[in-house]
Amino acid sequence: MAVVFNVAYEAWSDGAASGLGPMGNPLPGGAFDPNADSYGRYGANAGIRRLMGVLADAGVSANIFTSGILAERDPEQVKAVAAAGHEIMGHGYAQNLIPATLSEEDDESSIRRTTELLQDATGKRPTGWVSPRATADGSTMRRLIRHGYKWQADVVDDDLPYLERYEEGDLVAVPLCIDFNDLSHSMRFGRTPRQFVEIFQDTLEQALAASRDTVILDILVHTHCYGRPAGAWAYGALAKMCADRKDIWLTTRGRIAEHFLSEL
């Protein structure tokens, strides 16, 4: 049993906004929504610091899905997150730039800019990637390999890592478990933070009891959603619950990819 804590540290391009907002109903005619824009900006302004605090209190390192534009707007904050021992992942230049909707040239630009900005901010080139919406296009993986990436998390089709082979080289796919995602949990299903904790507790207990099963459980929260006081406590509670357990491997995606390659 591997358990990975994840934080989506996201932002949108200038003039674009989150498709989700506290009002729930999109404005007619595709009008720009300042309310949704403000909602999305919370993550970089306050949510990231709160979530870094609850992880520090538990002594847990996480994967940070990081929009490249944040390393452009606030490189010192991105540097601080990496310096705290978290694993920075490329997450596209901005959340509205979904690879499956981009031209090959724009997807290439997003990957290149994101990689360079994260390297400049942290001093280390990222080796792991997850696309905005975890939705790559048909050749994104080939571009990732050319930019030095070793693993990706744009897949939800298996429990365990597997190898993808391309003319450009190999890439480890580390599937993303989608069962514990604060956005779908709270906004799609209307569940509470306490239920977030209880559902994970129940799943962990049952998964550990299934002795023939080997899985990765991801806990993913977004800085603009559970980075707020009402949700951050639940993320912190799960981090403390997992921190000292001896019956799970509390790890990161990069370490999973390394382990997979060493055993291959």
Image (tube, rainbow, N blue to C red):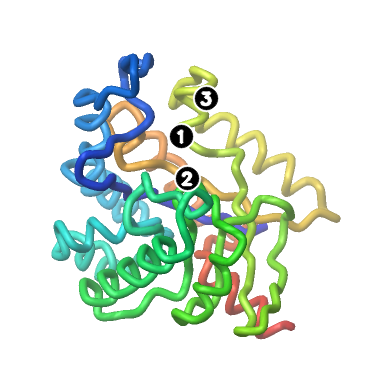
The image position of residue 39, as x and y in percent, is: 25, 30
Q: Residue at 30% x, 46% y: name it.
A: 51
Give whichever of discs 3 and 1 has the lower sequence position: 1
Left or right of residue 43: residue 255: right
Q: Residue at 76% x, 58% y: name it.
A: 214
At label 3, the amino acid type is Gln
For residue 239, above or below residue 151 = above
Q: Which residue is mark 1?
A: 182
Mark 3 secondary-structure assignment: helix
Q: For the residues marked 2 and 3, what is the alpha-carbon distance in whole angstroms? A: 15 Å
Is mark 1 in CB contact (under 8 Å) with mark 2? yes
The image position of residue 167, as x and y in percent, is: 66, 84
At label 2, the amino acid type is Leu
- Whether residue 243 is visible here, answered yes or no, is no
Q: Residue at 51% x, 38% y: name it.
A: 181
Q: For the residues marked 3 and 1, what is the alpha-carbon distance in whole angstroms? A: 11 Å
Give whichever of discs 2 and 3 has the lower sequence position: 3
Marker disc for residue 220: 2
Which quadrant does the N terminus fall into? bottom right
Q: Which residue is mark 3?
A: 195
| Residue 2 or residue 237, whichever sits in front | 2
Mark 2 secondary-structure assignment: strand
| Residue 158 or residue 86, whichever sits in front | 158
